[in-house]
Image (cartoon, rainbow, N blue to C red):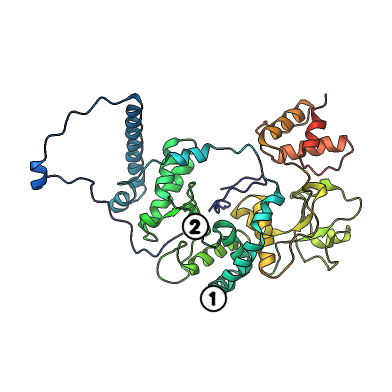
Amino acid sequence: MVITSSLQPRRSAPQRLLLAATSTSIFMLAGCAATAPTPSSASGGPAAASAPAPAPSAPSSPAAAAGEAHDREFARWIDQFRAQARSGGIDEATLHAAFDGVQFLPDVIERDRAQPEFTRAVWDYLDTAVSPTRVARGQDKRMEVRAELDAAAARYGVPPEIITAIWGMESNYGANYGSTPTIDALSTLGFEGRRDAWAREQLLAALRILQNRDIARERMIGSWAGAMGQTQFLPTSFLSYAVDGDGDGRRDIWNSMADVTASTANFLARAGWRPGQPWGVEVRLPAGFDFARADDALRQPASQWAAEGLRTMDGAPLPDLPEASVLLPAGARGPAFLVGPNFRSILRYNNSTSYALGVGLLAQRLAGGAGVQAPWPRELQPLSRSDMRALQEALNGKGLNAGTPDGVMGPATRSAIRSYQRGAGLPADGYPTTELLRQVQVP
């Protein structure tokens, strides 16, 4: 589970404590690490003795030569990492199982470097995350593994519907948790070097998992970014939070639902989940509400928000939430939510507002509750990365500190937008729109 503060969740796994994260995005019932593969060619024997001498090889093309050089460099990196892992306490059997057949995966590099130009509106994301199909399938799956969910809920205080929702978000209830070998993916990322320190840490953690015999090498699979299993734990998160829920001596978040549910609940509990409290509630804001107060930095008891005029959609009292903040995922023109500490626990699993909102709303639906009632401003077009960069540059040009123009929405950009909105007499919700971009670009 990896993590950004934008509306676009990066699946992964619990990255956040974090996840950390994803996942985007573990253990099948295997008793030991995979054995070293048999060499692809054997020496000696009658067949070898009678084989004709090989013909001289043709000179390598420039592309072939480059490929051979790349393979040598990758093998050299693996040898160096073997030495590092050996000094870190990894035994020879595990090193052989992990690296004797390791492969460089070009697709992993392509996906790691890709930065989508176009962002997805929160309502589009939730249309998929909390679709009728996902809700119906989740209700069926919840009954199918009811015993494991109830056991995890009783042990860690996390409701079954929250665990089920994360399971649904991360792998569509186990239907798709990735097929990329984790060792190959992390070795590729480490060799490429853009995230060398992170990849080395995760790869060493993956080796410890193999050495602990939680899973065999060939069964340690997941996303291209290294998140593993049905609820997409990164290897470091696995070592810290995975649980042997079925008592078989292994932590198998690929095939054992007792381990999947217990590990997920344990992560949230360790991330600060408070039993008995909801993640949040959709609310109506009073007339004249100062939208600048819709900020995670402003936290106060729900009773104080009620005194200021906030109400639930059906008029019932606000839930007893301490340290509650107002969330406007689509700005002043969209739905409003009052979220508490448990919402922030979900954010530690995956630091994306859209993701955490998706988990909360899916859990709400799985428990028989309503979906979002206020309409989304579907007429608004989300800013692309280049549009966001242009907005940041224009804000900086007006003396408002939006930070380094990088096309990513962050606290500095939101603060700069609010400053501009106040000066222009607009609702200071900090929400970027194409209309706002055009206004800010006017000299």
Tell me where residue 254 appears, x and y as whole percent. 46, 61
Asked whether the viewer can see residue 403, the reply is no
Vertically, is 277 above or below 395? below
Horizontally, is 417 left or right of 2 in the view?
A: right
Residue at (58, 51) in percent of width and height: 16
What crowding class fits label 1: few (fewer than 14 Cα within 10 Å), some (14-19), or many (20 or more)? few
Residue 434 vs residue 8, the one in the foreground: 434
Q: Residue 255 appears in which quarter of the rendering?
A: bottom left
Q: Which residue lies under the disc numbered 2? A: 240
Residue at (63, 60) in percent of width and height: 272
Tell me where residue 420 appears, x and y as whole percent. 82, 35
What's the residue type where badge 1 is placed? Answer: Ala
Tell me where residue 22 appears, x and y as whole percent. 55, 52
In the structure shown, which secondary structural element does the residue marked by tag 1 occupy? helix
Horizontally, is 356 left or right of 288 in the view?
A: left
Residue at (51, 64) in percent of width and height: 260
What's the residue type where badge 2 is placed? Answer: Ser
Vertically, is 408 above or below 204? above
Q: Which residue lies under the disc numbered 1? A: 147
Tell me where residue 224 appears, x and y as whole percent. 48, 47
* Mark seen at residue 313: none
Q: Residue 52 appears in which quarter of the rendering?
A: top left
What crowding class fits label 2: few (fewer than 14 Cα within 10 Å), some (14-19), or many (20 or more)? few
Do labels 2 and 1 touch, CB within 8 Å? Answer: no
Closer to the eye: label 2 or 1: 1
Vertically, is 326 above or below 165? above
Vertically, is 279 above or below 407? below
In the structure shown, which secondary structural element does the residue marked by tag 2 occupy? helix
